[in-house]
Image: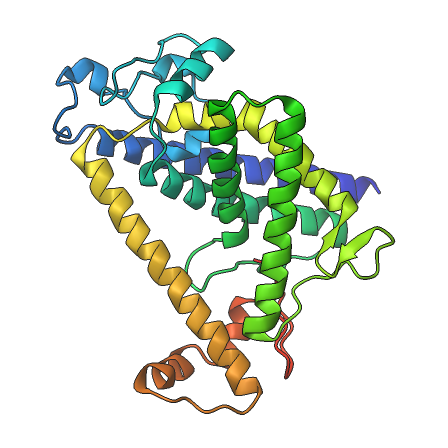
């Protein structure tokens, strides 16, 4: 028991050190992006612009709030001191939620969710297998999509001054719908079963159960009241052309990654059922993303003639 506890502490310490180092590197890189040529319409006060934005990894880091200054592309400003709940609320009332924030939330959510899942499976099941959901990069798109959906919904609920009960109920509906559509879509598209709640006593459908609806409601409430306001406040809005270009390139990369992953898994399902490639692109996919690649990349997936794919 002592060895297990000591190993767990050592593992968590290692994860913390690696994560801290990663945050510092990305923060430095994001500072470089922020210092580039300013976007038209952004105030040219260099001393203010130097700290106008914070790196996306600072959403979950301990960076001082003193480093936060308003994005100058808006008609309001962030306080330099630690923001109060009123400051956060006022910021959300005035900001514009667009593709810039969505891409960062998806990117960070994909990586943070994967890291948490990897640690959780290691602690609870002793599994160290790769649980990625895309063919390139350490991403699990289910978590990124969840982060974006929760943020968009909670942002609208904040705009309408929804109370806690409404937020909880809406989160329940959104979470249950997401699970149902994802489970049904995986079955229809890939002929697969990613997860099932059929064995649970409180199951509603094969992919939805009451206990997890409650989890979605609580998660949505926490996200809306505590996580989302500070996350959007820290992300801010783009102030330099370097930031805009970088996020555009990141968007292109993520779209290509998701598209190729879908093509890869679709061809895997077709190969398992004996369907040959029908064009040059599918031949290329079969050559470069064959069964050995899929097995090595998606280690926790089980493939049969009715291809079973993970919930990612």
Q: How many badges with numbers are in the image?
A: 0
Residue at 39%, 32% in the rendered image: 24
Q: Is residue 227 visible?
A: yes
Coordinates of residue 300 in the picture (x, y in percent): 63, 65
- Residue nearest the viewer, comparing 179 with 26: 179
Residue at 44%, 67% in the rendered image: 261
Does residue 2 appear to the left or right of 186 in the view shown?
Answer: right
Coordinates of residue 43 in the picture (x, y in percent): 15, 18
Coordinates of residue 174 in the picture (x, y in percent): 60, 44
Does 255 sit above or below residue 172? below
Does 269 sit above or below residue 96? below
Q: Is residue 309 visible?
A: no
* Figure coloring: rainbow
- Residue nearest the viewer, comparing 220 with 18: 220
Snapshot quadrant of residue 27: top left
What quarter of the picture does the C terminus occupy? Answer: bottom right
Does 8 sit above or below residue 221? below
Farthest front residue in view: 160
Coordinates of residue 55 in the picture (x, y in percent): 36, 31
What quarter of the picture does the N terminus occupy? Answer: top right
Snapshot quadrant of residue 164: top right
Residue at 84%, 55% in the rendered image: 200
């Amino acid at each position: 028991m002592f060895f297990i506890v000591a190993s767990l502490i050592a593992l968590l310490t290692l994860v913390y050190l690696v994560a801290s180092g990663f945050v510092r590197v990305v923060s430095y890189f994001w500072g470089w992006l922020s210092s580039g040529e300013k976007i038209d319409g952004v105030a040219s006060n260099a001393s203010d612009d130097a700290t106008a934005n914070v790196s996306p990894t600072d959403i979950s880091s301990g960076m001082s709030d003193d480093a936060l200054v308003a994005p100058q592309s808006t008609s309001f400003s962030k306080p330099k001191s630690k923001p109060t709940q009123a400051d956060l609320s006022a910021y959300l009332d005035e900001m514009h939620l667009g593709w810039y924030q969505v891409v960062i939330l998806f990117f960070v959510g994909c990586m943070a969710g994967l890291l948490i899942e990897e640690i959780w499976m290691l602690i609870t099941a002793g599994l160290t297998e790769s649980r990625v959901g895309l063919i390139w990069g350490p991403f699990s798109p289910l978590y990124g999509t969840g982060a974006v959906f929760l943020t968009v919904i909670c942002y609208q609920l904040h705009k309408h001054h929804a109370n806690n009960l409404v937020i909880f109920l809406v989160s329940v509906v959104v979470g249950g719908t997401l699970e149902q559509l994802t489970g049904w879509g995986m079955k229809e598209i890939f002929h697969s079963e990613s997860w099932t709640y059929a064995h649970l006593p409180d199951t509603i459908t094969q992919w939805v159960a009451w206990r997890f609806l409650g989890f979605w409601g609580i998660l949505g409430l926490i996200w809306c009241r505590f996580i989302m306001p500070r996350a959007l406040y820290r992300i801010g809005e783009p102030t330099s052309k370097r930031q805009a270009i970088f996020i555009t390139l990141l968007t292109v990369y993520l779209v290509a990654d998701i598209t190729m992953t879908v093509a890869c898994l679709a061809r895997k399902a077709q190969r398992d059922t004996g369907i040959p490639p029908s064009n040059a692109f599918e031949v290329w996919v079969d050559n470069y993303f064959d069964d050995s690649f899929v097995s090595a990349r998606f280690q926790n997936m089980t493939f049969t003639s009715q291809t079973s794919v993970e919930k990612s």
